[in-house]
Amino acid sequence: MMLDAALRIAAEGHRIFPCSTDGKKVPLVAWRKPHASPLWTHDYIRQITEWWTEWPDALIGHPTGMRGPHATASTEPGSLVAGPSRRWCEVVIDVDIKRGAYGLQTLAELEQDYGPLPETCTSRTRSGGQHRWFWTLSEIRNSAGKIGKREAAGLDVRGEGGFVVVPPSDGYEWIGDSWMVPDGDVQLAELPDAWVNALIRRAQKQENDAARLAWIAESERSREQTSDVVTRLMAELASAPKGTRNDTLSRHAFTLGCIVSEKRMTEADAERQLDYAMRSWPAEERDERKDRDTAARQLRAGMEA
């Protein structure tokens, strides 16, 4: 029964939720909400039981992405991350082969560029593809088709903001042992640094491209109101809540770079605007060197876009 399988997985501290059995694998609940603690509690047992009683054949969905400090007796998530106080990111590389996707070929090409991926916990998907599971201390975001050299690369990344369906859901099975059950011998391997850096760079490029398009659209609407645009962006940056400041700084510094490239303000003015906005953040919550590096890098990227 799927209920028994769901309870076994949850008992190991993994968050799960039900997904539809059609090809779309749609979550049947608001899965981004923390329905239950990863701890084995009576409320969690009751919630899972209610879900799989209502949808007895539902696939088992599992969110990927950032994890809090590991809260079990072990000090190492996947028996690999040192220290119980460190946050880590669960990353799944989704290798697709259906409808002409070149997942395995793309993966082989990327291993030539970034080095071979280590052996790790791997599951087979309903379409015959693979989910390869890794951990890293860096935040890797969910993306689709953003790595690889082909338009239909067939290689997706499930990180922060994503989820995967896990065995023993219908059509899914572990290749070898699973790390999600007590008797599993295979643990998560660490995603190599070269792969982590490549994924972060590609994610940043995607964000920069989006920021560039947004600025072009805004620029076309009102070329004479540059000062108003800058004032609004810097107000947003100054008031950005903790946890969103780095992303906001990256986007807005890039946009100022676009404005500088169009000779609508000077580079020095842009630097002063960014510095003034960042000084609005509480001093104890700032990493001045990191913030200045991010601002300078993204300002330059916008100027060269």
Image: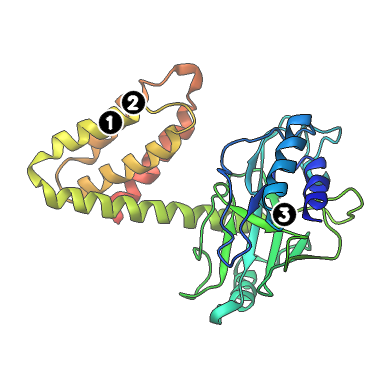
Q: Secondary structure at mark 2?
A: helix
Q: In the displayed structure, does residue 166 sit left or right of residue 220?
A: right
Q: Amino acid at mark 2?
A: Ala
Q: Amino acid at mark 1?
A: Met
Q: Which residue is mark 3?
A: 56
Q: Which residue is mark 1?
A: 234
Q: Which residue is mark 2?
A: 238
Q: Nearer the viewer, mark 3 or mark 2?
A: 3
Figure quadrant of the N terminus = bottom right
Residue at x-position 72% and y-position 54%: 56
Outermost residue on the bottom side: it is 100
Q: Nearer the viewer, residue 220 or 271?
A: 220
Residue 88's place in the image compared with 41, above or below, is: below
> Does label 3 or label 2 sit earlier along the sequence?
3
Q: CA distance from mark 1 to mark 2?
A: 6 Å
Q: Secondary structure at mark 1?
A: helix
> Does label 1 or label 3 sit earlier along the sequence?
3
Outermost residue on the front side: it is 54
Residue at x-position 76% and y-position 63%: 122
Percent across and percent down for residue 176 are: 85, 65
Local crowd size for mark 2, using a 10 Å CA cut-off: few (<14), some (14–19), many (≥20) = many
Q: Amino acid at mark 3?
A: Pro
Q: Is residue 145 visible?
A: yes
Please identify the quarter of the rendering in which residue 305 is found: bottom left
Residue at x-position 55% and y-position 43%: 30
Q: In the displayed structure, does residue 257 sit left or right of residue 92?
A: left
Percent across and percent down for residue 226 are: 14, 40
Q: Nearer the viewer, mark 1 or mark 3?
A: 3
How many numbered discs, if any? 3
